[in-house]
C-alpha cells in the first residue's frame, strides 16, 4: 500500500525536515515512538493515517494531519 497521500499541510520539524506525505509522517512517528509517553495518541495517529490513506477523503486526511501534529508538538519536534 503506497503512503504517498499528501497531508493537508506540510509539517515542519525543528530540524528542518518537512513532512509532506503519510510516508514522511509515519517515519517521523516511528523514529520518535520510543520517546513518547503517549503511545495511545501515536497509535491513533497511525490509525487515522490508515483510514485516510484508504478513503482519500479530505476530512479523513485533515483528521490524520491534526493528530500527527498533536503527537509531534509536545515532543518538541515541530517548529
Image (cartoon, rainbow, N blue to C red):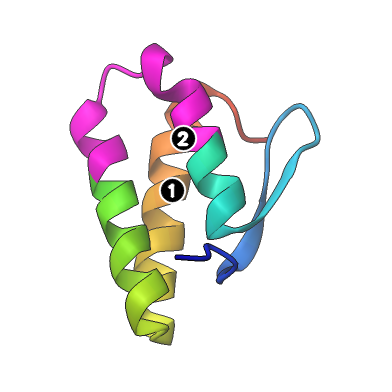
In the figure, 27 relative to 33: above or below?
A: below
The majority secondary structure of the magenta stretch comes to helix
State left or right for residue 28 relative to residue 41.
right
Chain part drawn in magenta: 28-43
- Residue 40 on the magenta span: yes
Which mark, by number, is residue 29?
2
In the figure, 45 relative to 37: above or below?
A: below
Q: Nearer the viewer, residue 71 or 49?
A: 49
Q: Which picture quadrant has residue 13?
A: top right
Q: Secondary structure at mark 2?
A: helix
**Which residue occupies 39% across, 43% down?**
70
Tell me, yes or no, whether the two marked residues, 2 and 1, touch with CB atoms within 8 Å: yes
Q: Position of residue 45 (x, y in %)?
A: 32, 49
Q: Quadrant of the N terminus?
A: bottom left
Q: Nearer the viewer, residue 71 or 30?
A: 30
Q: Position of residue 53 (x, y in %)?
A: 41, 71
Tag 1 residue: 68
Q: Position of residue 3 (x, y in %)?
A: 52, 62
**Which residue occupies 52% across, 65% down?**
2
Q: Residue furthest left?
A: 40
Q: Secondary structure at mark 1?
A: helix
Q: Residues within 10 Å of mark 2 (few under 14, many from 20)?
A: many
Q: Which picture quadrant has residue 52?
A: bottom left
Q: Position of residue 51 (x, y in %)?
A: 28, 69
Q: CA distance from mark 2 to mark 1?
A: 8 Å
State left or right for residue 45 relative to residue 14.
left
Which mark, by number, is residue 55?
none
- Residue 74 on the magenta span: no
In the figure, 25 relative to 34: above or below?
A: below
In the figure, 18 relative to 63: above or below?
A: above
Q: Residue furthest right?
A: 16
If you read the primary sequence from the N terminus, does the residue marked by circle 2 or circle 1 appear first? Answer: 2
Amino acid at each position: 500500500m503506497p503512503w504517498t497521500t499528501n497531508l493537508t499541510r506540510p509539517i515542519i520539524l525543528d530540524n528542518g525536515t518537512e513532512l509532506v506525505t503519510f510516508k514522511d509522517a509515519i517515519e517521523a512517528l516511528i523514529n520518535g515512538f520510543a520517546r513518547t509517553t503517549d503511545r495511545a495518541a501515536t497509535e491513533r495517529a497511525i490509525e487515522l493515517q490508515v483510514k485516510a490513506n484508504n478513503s482519500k477523503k479530505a476530512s479523513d486526511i485533515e483528521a490524520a494531519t491534526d493528530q500527527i501534529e498533536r503527537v509531534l508538538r509536545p515532543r518538541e519536534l515541530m517548529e
